[in-house]
């Protein structure tokens, strides 16, 4: 059986356009794709390593030195799940709901549900596996909105994006 193996530099998906391009490139593959969960850990900032994709699904390994997805937002064309692989985070909802999560905890986010999260200071580097399912393949999977329904770029300053600085010798695997 033919197969592809994907090896990406995490910095390749640290913009919305790069993330969208990686999904499109990987979704064009019509053979089984294999990937390994490995990420260079950040001293500062976050990484988004797009590991695999189909026209209706994507798999992304995400790491956070501190912070998280700090701006309250919703994905209007994607259901997704986070699996916490390492570290700890606090997830928040629009009415002040809060949930502390640790390794092996998971959260399912149906399209349109508002959330934000932050890595817990002093814990191990936060590593999440994010699996997303497109609701309408004819619409942009990267569409996010804030509480006012306005476009919200996940890699923008509004989402507390900071420059990425990687450890040279620290990896999640």
Image: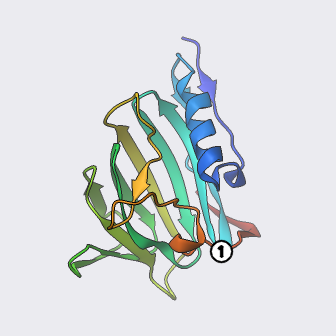
Quadrant for the C terminus in the image: bottom right
The image position of residue 124, as x and y in percent, is: 52, 78
In the rendering, at what x and y percent does residue 120 appear?
45, 83
| Image quadrant where one finds the N terminus | top right
Crowding near the residue tagged with mark 1, few <14, some 14–19, many ≥20 C-alpha atoms within 10 Å: some
Residue 140 in which image quadrant: top left
Residue at image point 55% right, 75% down? 160
12 lies above or below 145: above
Provide the secondary structure element on which disc 1 rests: loop
Report the residue that reaches farthest toward the bottom: 122
Q: Residue at x 71, y 72 (%)?
A: 163
Q: Is 153 situated left or right of 107 in this image? A: right
The colour scheme used here is rainbow
Q: Quadrant of residue 36?
A: top right
> Quick check: 88 above or below 23?
below
Left or right: where does residue 9 sit relative to residue 50?
Answer: right
Residue bearing mark 1: 162
The percent coordinates of residue 25 (x first, y second) are 62, 29
**Residue placed most toward the observer, 119 or 123:** 119
Residue name at image x 64 percent, y 34 percent: 6
In the displayed orientation, state which residue is furthest to the right: 168
Count of labels in the image: 1
Q: Is residue 164 above or below residue 134?
A: below
Q: Residue at x 72, y 49 (%)?
A: 9
Q: Position of residue 104 (x, y in %)?
A: 34, 62
């Amino acid at each position: 059986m033919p197969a592809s193996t994907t090896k990406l530099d995490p910095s390749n998906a640290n913009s919305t356009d790069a993330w969208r391009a990686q999904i499109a490139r990987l979704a064009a593959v019509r053979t089984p794709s294999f990937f390994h969960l490995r990420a260079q850990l950040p001293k500062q900032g976050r990484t988004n390593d797009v590991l695999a994709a189909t026209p209706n699904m994507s798999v992304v390994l995400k790491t956070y030195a501190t912070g998280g997805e700090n701006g309250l937002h919703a994905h209007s064309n994607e259901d997704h799940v986070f699996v916490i692989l390492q570290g700890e985070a606090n997830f928040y909802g629009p009415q002040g709901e809060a949930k502390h999560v640790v390794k092996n905890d998971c959260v399912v986010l149906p399209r349109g549900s508002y959330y934000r999260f932050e890595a817990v200071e002093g814990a191990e580097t936060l590593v999440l596996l994010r699996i997303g399912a497109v609701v309408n393949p004819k619409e942009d999977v990267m569409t996010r909105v804030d509480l006012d329904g306005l476009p919200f770029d996940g890699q923008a300053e509004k989402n507390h994006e900071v420059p990425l600085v990687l450890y040279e010798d620290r990896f999640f695997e």
